[in-house]
Amino acid sequence: MLFIALIVLVAMSLAGIALIRGVDTANLIAGNLAFKQNATHGGDWAVEHARTWLQAQSAADLYNNAGGRYLAAMQSGVDFTGTDPSRPDFDWNADGFDPGPDPAGNQVRYVIHRMCDLAGNPGSVNCVRTTTGGTADSTKGGATYGGAALPSTSQIYYRITARVTGPRNTVSYVQVMVN
């Protein structure tokens, strides 16, 4: 009888240890997801900061690079998220713009890329642009079909890449295209 009681005691001890490990692992995963979500919210904050800066610039100010914050040409040969081993990584510490910590205290850096092949006047270099509207594209309400087009002008696209480092070295990247 004593032998059976010892076996039951060992089995219950092993089950208790497994339960504790399972709960600890679940808490660790939930904590990591919370840190990742917090870092992603910091990326949204950085994108809004970059978009506000971009809107405040004149067109001529955007012809050339502006420190580590703005690149006037696409950098297709550089890996901004550190996931492509065939391309060199972007040096976020030296080149990314640091607007200061976000409201949650995460370290935030961002860079804006103008989606053009080269720096300079976008009229003389190849850029990724929105299409222009014409009479066949759309109509306003109250007009006959095809008779009154919505006016539009071609605009250049910009890519904002934000890198957020949170607690426990949680790193999150956010990329957004704006025009």
Image (cartoon, helix red, strand yellow):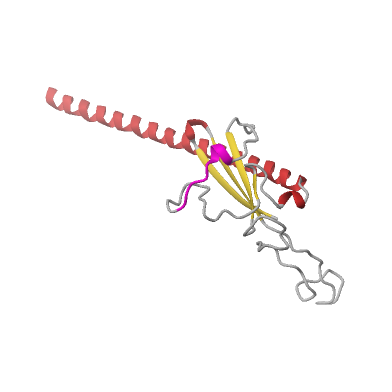
Between residues 58 and 56, which one lies in front from this camera angle?
A: 58
**Residue 140 versus residue 169: which sits nearer the camera?**
169
Range covered by the magenta-colored residues: 87-95
Q: How many labels does the image show?
A: 0
Residue 167 as seen in the image, left or right of residue 16: right
Specify whether residue 119 is in view: yes
Q: Which of 9 and 149 is in front in this view?
A: 149
Pinpoint residue 41: horizontal percent, then vertical percent: 60, 40
State the image coordinates of residue 148 (x, y, percent, origin top left): 85, 73
User: Could you tell whether 168 is left or right of 158 in the image?
Assistant: left
To which quarter of the image does residue 107 belong?
Answer: top right
Q: Which residue is drawn at 53% across and 48% down?
A: 80
* Above or below 156: residue 2: above
Q: Magenta stretch: residue 88 in it?
A: yes
State the residue lying farthest toward the right. Answer: 142
For the N terminus, the quadrant is top left
Residue 124: x and y in percent read: 71, 63
* 86 shown above or below 10: below
Q: Does the magenta stretch include residue 169?
A: no
Q: Is residue 1 visible?
A: no
Q: Is residue 80 left or right of residue 63?
A: left
